[in-house]
Amino acid sequence: GDSVTQTEGPVTVSESESLIINCTYSATSIAYPNLFWYVRYPGEGLQLLLKVITAGQKGSSRGFEATYNKETTSFHLQKASVQESDSAVYYCALGRNSNNRIFFGDGTQLVVKP
Amino acid sequence: NTKITQSPRYLILGRANKSLECEQHLGHNAMYWYKQSAEKPPELMFLYNLKQLIRNETVPSRFIPECPDSSKLLLHISAVDPEDSAVYFCASSHGTVNNQAPLFGEGTRLSVL
């Protein structure tokens, strides 16, 4: 079946440091799934951070970037300089084009220290 | 995301019956219920498209969804169990194909005593 594996949290970094949260996926019955990053800030609901539907493309939002790499089946989330307000739980997710079912990874809690 | 509203936001129950409500003002045709238990990712429970239930995951029969119109989604829960303690997210998308990324509401946090 489809699955998503991401960096186990919590990940703690200091403000202005760089960040990478790893995500790899397995999609057994589809060659090119849609890939997403969702974020959940404390006390809030899930928000779509970015999505990429074409292999080889990069998505970006709020200073975060992720590149869809079909060779390594990866979709790592990166940011050059984090802020304390980036503290949240980040979910890598995989979706099918045909039925819009979204598979979420276990989530990675990010703690940014001032 | 204030365009998808859920009520109530917090719910504490004994073994009672209750309904969760969700409404979206985005003109979306597809609506979803997701359950997120502590330390776990969100898991799809139900999906409606154009008011028709098209995916019914393996959830206990005490959970009954209802979609009275394309902008509103309900989740009726009868005789809740402690394992039902979780955050229930409503989500919606334009449709169910063509790379839709569901938008989520803020969730209803259910605590079962």
Image (tube, rainbow, N blue to C red):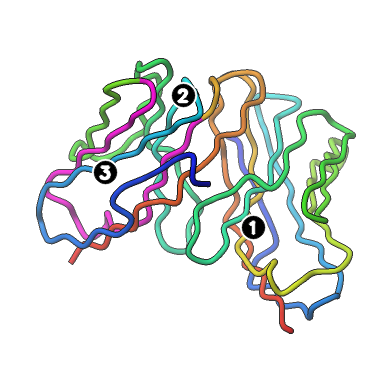
Is disc 3 placed on a helix, strand or loop? strand
**x then y, percent, for residue B51:** 35, 17
At horizontal 65% and vertical 19% (from top left) the residue drawn is: B98
Judged left or right of residue B110, residue A40 is: right
Q: Nearer the viewer, mark 2 or mark 1?
A: 2
Residue drawn at (32%, 20%) of the image? B69
- What whole-number distance in Å separates the C-alpha atoms at marks 2 and 3? 17 Å
Q: Which residue is mark 3?
A: B20
- As displayed, is residue B81 above or below residue B70? below
Task: Tell me the subunit letter for badge 2.
Answer: B
At mark 1, the secondary structure is strand
At a point 64% along the width and 63% down the height, the residue shown is A108
**Amino acid bearing label 2:** Ala
Mark 3 neighbour density, 10 Å: few (under 14) some (14–19) many (20 or more): many
Which range is magenta? B70-92
The x and y percentages for residue B35 are 39, 47
Q: Which residue is mark 1?
A: A90
